[in-house]
Image (cartoon, rainbow, N blue to C red):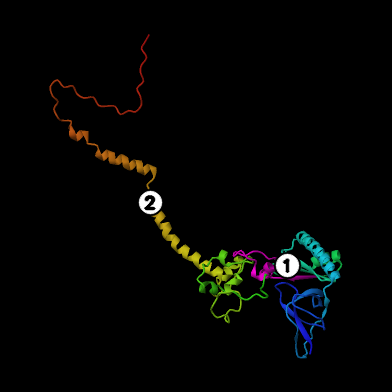
Amino acid sequence: MPEIVGIKFKQCGKAYDFEANELDLKIGDSVIVESDFGISVGRVVTEKKGVEPSDRQFKKVIRHMNDTDKKSKEENAKIEKEARDYCRERIMARGLPMKLVGAESTLDRKRIVFYFTADGRIDFRELVKDLAAKFKTRIEMRQIGVRDEARFIGGIGICGRTLCCSTFLSSFEPVSIKMAKKQELTLNVGKLSGQCGRLMCCLRYEYEGRLEGITADEELPAELEEKAKSEPEGMISQVLSKIKENGDENRPQQDSKAQTSAARVPNKDNRHRGRRDVREQQKPDMKTAQPENQPQAEGEQPKQEKRHDRRPRRRRRPNK
């Protein structure tokens, strides 16, 4: 009966079964294994257990990690840094619409894998030729998603702790906006989204509803907001669009109020003209007060009419 152990290649990666190969292995031991990726360094995460013989073939653990392997790993770290810098330089030189996330090399340096993100398919054949000519080894390009990018880079969440995906999560489970509604959280993208731009994985922790019906992430990036209008309900972008529509419905009422208030305020000319008309109405009519045919008293001189000419009189100079 063969004995197998679970081995992880990354802290938050999946555990793969390998045959112990009659080695004394304990949890936490660093070992050298031969995987599909190549000769790599792994860490034991489960105890040895026996399995019944079957048609499935398990890869074998080669040996424990020794000092030579540690030196090779340190040298590979320098090569990986050089590979990242050179790859970014060639990406900028060729103008490829892609973002390099990282690079990894096998322990025997027979393969270097570059991880990148992009919106669509990228023709990187010329880039691979440049990298192969530089490092004289096999080059592999792998496109990953935004969640894997956040796990690869790491960071601090809004809770002040290290990201869950780079700490203990071994796989990404689908998260729905229904989880936030059920927990009566504010439907705000800034508070519900993580560093990857998707819904935070921790929304799933305190959700008490059924998880069988949630099979995929119900969210879309910001650039696909127009497409989200035709999709089923439950997406952040659609919720925001509804809120925006409600705001637009209330806006005409505000505009009508502004128009009525603007109509109440007259122009400057009309305002002064209205005051002048009111003053003229309040002034008594002198003609009606003293009619022309009223007889004058004896010895009273007739009153001279006042000149309303605003221009000043010119004084005549006396003749010399």
Q: Is residue 240 magenta?
A: no
Q: Secondary structure at mark 2?
A: helix
Q: Are marks 2 and 1 in contact (CB under 8 Å)?
A: no
What residue range appears in magenta? Answer: 139-166
Q: Residues within 10 Å of mark 1 (few under 14, many from 20)?
A: some
Residue denoted by label 1? 116
Q: Is residue 47 above or below residue 315?
A: below
User: Can you give x and y, in whole percent of width and height, for residue 92 in the image?
Assistant: 75, 59
Residue denoted by label 2? 263
- Residue 124 seen in the figure: no
Three-letter code, disc 1? Phe
Q: Is residue 148 magenta?
A: yes
Residue at 75% x, 61% y: name it.
Answer: 95
Which mark is nearer the camera, 2 or 1?
1
Going by the image, does 127 lie left or right of 277?
right
Going by the image, does 252 lie left or right of 227?
left
Precedes in sequence: disc 2 or disc 1: 1
Looking at the rendering, in which quadrant would you find the N terminus? bottom right
Three-letter code, disc 2? Ala
